[in-house]
């Protein structure tokens, strides 16, 4: 199977309000205050092709000079000192900038009265915490491009799972799927829980090359993922694939064979990790003995739970694997379609529909 | 109770200024620190720490398949996710009654050793040490920097830097030699991690019952060859850190008071001994004491207990200043532990999390973090234990218990001896960490590189044992199990920055209750119901200020050093407070390295 028919191109005609005539300098304003573990920032520091310090120190030719503002790596002491560029951007005094959001966006509308789910600095007027949502509202319309780092920011992720109290959602759910940045781009989603380091770096480089006027906009699929990274399934890059084709399945995790019977969702998940490894070609998931739990997917995690059981549909496709062919591809295509959707409770309306009940007991 | 005694000095009339740092940088997660500083007497008078992020794992885990717990709870933390997975698997193994094959324990131990090496290196050299780098010291204590330029580095033969200032320069962010090398080392150690656990941060090969990692000769030799490449860096890091920290005591007399607290340390133990551990609650004391980092609670320098059952039963989750409703009127999930001991309503097994978002009020409720405490049966007090940022408590507890005795690491009663083999340039080296006089900012930071050495040394032992098993053909890494209808479990482990526990209750084969307690809620907790401040608050409150800048260009470096010495990481639940008075000034100079916010 290929996921070709899912990769409808949504590359817009280049040129929104600001055509990419080529910038010499750009700020990257990275906000990790979404509901998340900050694992995407940490993962980014693992990238080595190129490394973050190479980009920041200007060692990669063809990119604009990058001013990275990221809380974890910032040499500043914090507070207003650190917030200054964000405040300037919110006032419209810092252009152009690339906004990176890490973490899922909570629904402030479900809070009755005061309070916040997550904040970033304080409101200078009231001294109360400034909710993340306020920053996104201010910065997204002014950003030259917006990048969602990780599955939480892209599609809601873990914090948006069933039974959550915060009504979390991905950035495109929050801004609207038809959102376009100042540079004419939709939200650029780099899913992964966390981002595979090089996957993120490559996307960032492409967006920066585009900002420099040296490249067209990055080709994205219908879920706004870079096509070259997410256009194939896990299975298609898995080195246990030959076992699958031979109908030779591991029955527990001691086995070097195909893991589909012990929970691997690889046949229908869009991700390049087993092929690429986790860093410098080392590690990964099914290739080293981990079941694919679909962590890059819009339906993650709910669609894939319980993780340690054979995926529904897996039974059928692994049974008929010997006369495999068009049937399998069709069946998988249907499942791939199903897992490429977000649950319906990820929205920005006033009602909390995730099923959360504070006093629920098993 | 926990507050450090104030220093007797001739006091001038107070000149109070409210200052806050929110968000705090170079940490993971959302932390704000709010202080009142008396500039006349140069000390911090009041401190509140707050976290502005709610995440709700204990809420949305309910009703899920318990086997999913490790995969989901990994996502609590973006830097030590594997510590959560491991701890969750420990708890599940107790609940399911399954003991993983020995080789799986070695592989898990090797993964965790790589994690400690990676995370402590990245944190110390790329995040914490920026506060001690040349650019920062120049901006805050130019007099000290001038002295550092004149001070020869005593351990220059090991690390190669001539003066203390040369070391500080090497730590300048993005440009300094050590800063850059540390980033590289943090990649090599992460590769070692990926060899064992598949992916960093959120591992892919860890299951309750064992691991899925394919044990092949290259699994271990790939790890070993990388370990040998980092071993000299580890020796140099200890020497460089010792030089800078010793210099600080000498250059700034009284610096030992910065971030000093009463010794109130907790450690839950790390690295199971595969020959002893069986994950049964009844034998938890024995296998807990056989761990390669000994669990323990250390109060005023004395070991109170190293029995994991006592440690478990003493856990209390308090409210007071947190945005939650109390659960004290709910039905308890677990009234007695498997040995028949009563379990308190405030114990994690019985907790119900009910979030109530509201305004921040430093006289009332001001944080999303709750207040974990340990009930000390002898005094009846609820101790606000801290983790010493992880390594300080681990080394202290291990040293006092004197139980660890391996070819590479030995605990002596008042020290821990760590032997590292010959590396590319440096000879075989034995390092000795001795119990320090204080639990303060510098000793928390100093313990960190020693613990990296500890982890490297233990990794050598785990490798030898794992390769021995492989050579004898014993390659089983996973043991099957059934999820029981009803069960409870608890897991104790050390996340990089300190104590980590997971408590699990299963009913009808589903999660009825799940409460992870990572280190940062312990360290970053706000005032509890008794008004006892959390460890950050306590450590900062009353600390002297050595920074040369006045209120107008004050950077708060001593305060930030203290907070960062604990290795804050708040995705698991912290922000500096402006008191309730008027904000006179919020002063933070923009940048130290060009172009960084
Ligand atoms: S292990 Fe998973 S990804 Fe690999 S072949 Fe089997 S099902 Fe496909
Ligand atoms: S293979 Fe599956 S679990 Fe692994 S990174 Fe890709 S989507 Fe996530």
Image (cartoon, rainbow, N blue to C red):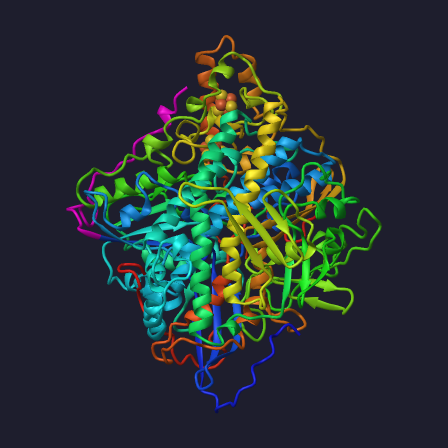
Rendering coords of residue A200 (x, y %): 35, 41
Q: Position of residue B597 (x, y in %)?
A: 32, 61
Classify A359 as above or below B17: above
The quadrant of the image that shows the C terminus of chain A is top right
- Image position, residue A168 (x, y; %): 49, 49
Check the image and name the residue furthest to the top: A323
Q: Which of B6 and B398 lies nearest the eye of the viewer? A: B398
Residue furthest toward the left? A21
Does residue A36 appear in the picture of this structure?
no
- Quadrant containing the N terminus of chain A in the rendered view: top left
- Magenta span covers which residues? A1-25
- Residue A96: quarter of image: bottom left
The image shows residue B415, relative to residue A229, as above or below, that is below
| Residue name at image x 39 percent, y 54 percent | B157
Q: Is residue B290 magenta?
A: no
Magenta region, main secondary structure: loop
Q: Is residue A9 magenta?
A: yes
Which of the pair A353/A6 is nearer the observer? A6
Residue in the foreground of this view, choosing between B316 and B499: B499
Vertical position of residue B442 compared to residue B80: above or below: below
Nearest to the observer: residue A22 or residue B585:
B585
Report the residue at 76% width, 48% height from top: B285
- Which quadrant would residue B537 be assigned to in this image? bottom right
Q: Position of residue B491 (x, y in %)?
A: 67, 46
């Amino acid at each position: 199977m290929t996921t070709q028919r899912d990769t409808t191109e949504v590359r817009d005609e280049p040129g929104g309000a600001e055509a990419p005539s080529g910038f010499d300098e750009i700020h990257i304003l990275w906000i990790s205050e979404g509901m998340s573990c900050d694992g995407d920032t940490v993962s980014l520091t693992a990238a080595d092709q190129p490394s973050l310090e190479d980009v920041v120190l200007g060692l990669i030719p063809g990119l604009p000079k990058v001013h990275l503002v990221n809380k974890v790596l910032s040499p500043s002491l914090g507070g207003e000192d650190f917030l200054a560029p964000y405040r300037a951007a919110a006032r419209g005094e810092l252009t152009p900038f690339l906004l990176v959001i890490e973490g899922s966006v909570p629904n402030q509308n479900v809070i009755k009265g005061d309070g916040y789910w997550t904040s970033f600095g304080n409101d200078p007027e009231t001294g109360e915490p400034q909710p993340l949502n306020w920053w996104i509202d201010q910065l997204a319309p002014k950003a030259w491009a917006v990048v969602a780092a990780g599955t939480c920011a892209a599609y809601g992720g873990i914090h948006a799972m069933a039974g959550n109290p915060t009504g979390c959602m991905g950035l495109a759910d929050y801004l609207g799927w038809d959102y376009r940045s100042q540079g004419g781009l939709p939200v650029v989603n780099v899913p992964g829980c966390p981002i595979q380091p090089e996957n993120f770096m490559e996307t960032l480089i492409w967006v920066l090359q585009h900002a420099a006027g040296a490249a067209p906009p990055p080709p994205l699929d219908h879920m706004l993922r870079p096509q070259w990274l997410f256009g194939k399934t896990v299975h298609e890059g898995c080195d246990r694939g030959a076992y699958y084709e031979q109908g030779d399945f591991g029955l527990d995790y001691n086995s070097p064979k195909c893991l589909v019977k012990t929970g691997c969702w690889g046949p229908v998940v869009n991700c390049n990790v087993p092929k690429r490894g986790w860093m410098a070609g080392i590690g990964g998931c099914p290739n080293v003995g981990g079941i694919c739990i679909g962590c890059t997917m819009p339906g993650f995690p709910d669609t894939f739970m319980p993780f340690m059981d054979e995926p529904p549909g897996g039974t059928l496709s692994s049974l008929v694997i010997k006369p495999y062919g068009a049937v399998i591809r069709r069946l998988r295509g249907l499942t791939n379609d199903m897992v490429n959707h977000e649950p319906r409770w990820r929205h920005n309306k006033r009602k909390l529909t995730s099923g959360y009940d504070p006093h629920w007991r098993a | 109770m926990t507050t450090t005694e104030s220093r007797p000095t001739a006091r001038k009339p107070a000149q109070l200024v409210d200052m806050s740092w929110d968000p705090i940088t170079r940490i993971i997660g959302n932390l704000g620190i709010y202080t009142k500083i008396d500039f006349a007497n140069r000390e911090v008078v009041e401190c509140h720490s707050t976290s502005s992020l709610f995440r709700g794992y204990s809420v949305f885990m309910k009703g899920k398949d318990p086997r999913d717990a490790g995969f989901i709870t990994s996502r609590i933390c973006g830097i030590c996710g594997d510590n959560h997975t491991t701890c969750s698997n420990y708890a599940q193994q107790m609940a399911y009654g399954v003991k993983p094959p020995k080789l799986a324990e070695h592989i898990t131990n090797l993964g965790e050793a790589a994690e400690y090496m990676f995370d402590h290196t990245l944190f110390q050299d790329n995040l914490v040490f920026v506060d001690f780098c040349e650019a920062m010291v120049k901006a805050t204590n130019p007099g000290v920097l001038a002295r550092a330029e004149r001070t020869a580095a005593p351990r220059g033969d090991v690390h190669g830097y001539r003066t203390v200032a040369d070391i500080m320069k090497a730590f300048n962010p993005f440009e300094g030699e050590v800063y850059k090398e540390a980033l590289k080392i943090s990649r090599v150690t992460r590769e070692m991690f990926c060899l064992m656990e598949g992916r960093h941060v959120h591992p892919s090969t860890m299951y309750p019952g064992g691991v899925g990692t394919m044990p092949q000769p290259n699994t271990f030799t790939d790890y070993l060859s990388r370990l040998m490449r980092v071993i000299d860096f580890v020796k140099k890091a200890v020497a460089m850190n010792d030089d800078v920290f010793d210099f600080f005591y000498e250059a700034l007399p009284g610096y030992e008071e910065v971030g000093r607290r009463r010794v109130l340390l907790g450690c839950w133990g790390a690295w199971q001994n595969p020959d002893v551990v069986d994950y049964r609650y009844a034998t938890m004391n024995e296998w807990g004491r056989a761990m390669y980092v000994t669990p323990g609670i250390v109060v005023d320098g004395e070991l109170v207990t190293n029995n994991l059952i006592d440690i478990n039963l003493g856990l209390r989750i308090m409210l007071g200043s947190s945005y939650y409703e109390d659960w004290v009127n709910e039905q308890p999930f677990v009234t007695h532990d498997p040995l028949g001991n009563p379990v308190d309503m405030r114990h994690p097994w019985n907790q119900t999390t009910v979030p109530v978002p509201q305004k921040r009020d430093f006289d009332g409720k001001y944080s999303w973090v709750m207040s974990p405490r340990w009930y000390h049966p002898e005094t009846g007090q609820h101790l606000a234990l801290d983790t010493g940022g992880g390594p300080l408590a681990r080394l202290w507890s291990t040293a006092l218990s004197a139980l660890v005795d391996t070819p590479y690491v030995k605990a002596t009663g008042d020290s821990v001896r760590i032997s590292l083999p010959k590396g590319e340039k440096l000879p075989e080296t034995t390092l000795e960490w001795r119990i320090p006089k204080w639990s303060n900012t510098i000793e928390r930071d100093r313990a960190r590189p020693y613990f990296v050495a500890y982890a490297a040394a233990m990794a050598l032992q785990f490798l030898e044992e794992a390769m021995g098993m492989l050579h004898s053909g014993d390659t089983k890494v996973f043991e099957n199990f059934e999820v029981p209808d009803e069960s409870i479990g608890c897991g104790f482990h050390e996340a990089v920055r300190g104590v980590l526990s997971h408590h699990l209750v299963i009913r009808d084969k589903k999660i009825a209750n799940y409460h992870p307690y990572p280190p940062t809620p312990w360290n970053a907790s706000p005032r509890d119901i008794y008004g006892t401040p959390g460890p950050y608050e306590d450590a900062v409150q009353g600390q002297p200020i050595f920074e040369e800048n006045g209120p107008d260009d004050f950077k708060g470096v001593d305060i930030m050093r203290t907070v960062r010495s604990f290795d804050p990481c708040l995705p698991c639940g912290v922000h500096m407070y402006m008191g309730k008075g008027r904000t006179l000034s919020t002063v933070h100079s923009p940048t130290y390295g060009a172009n960084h916010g």
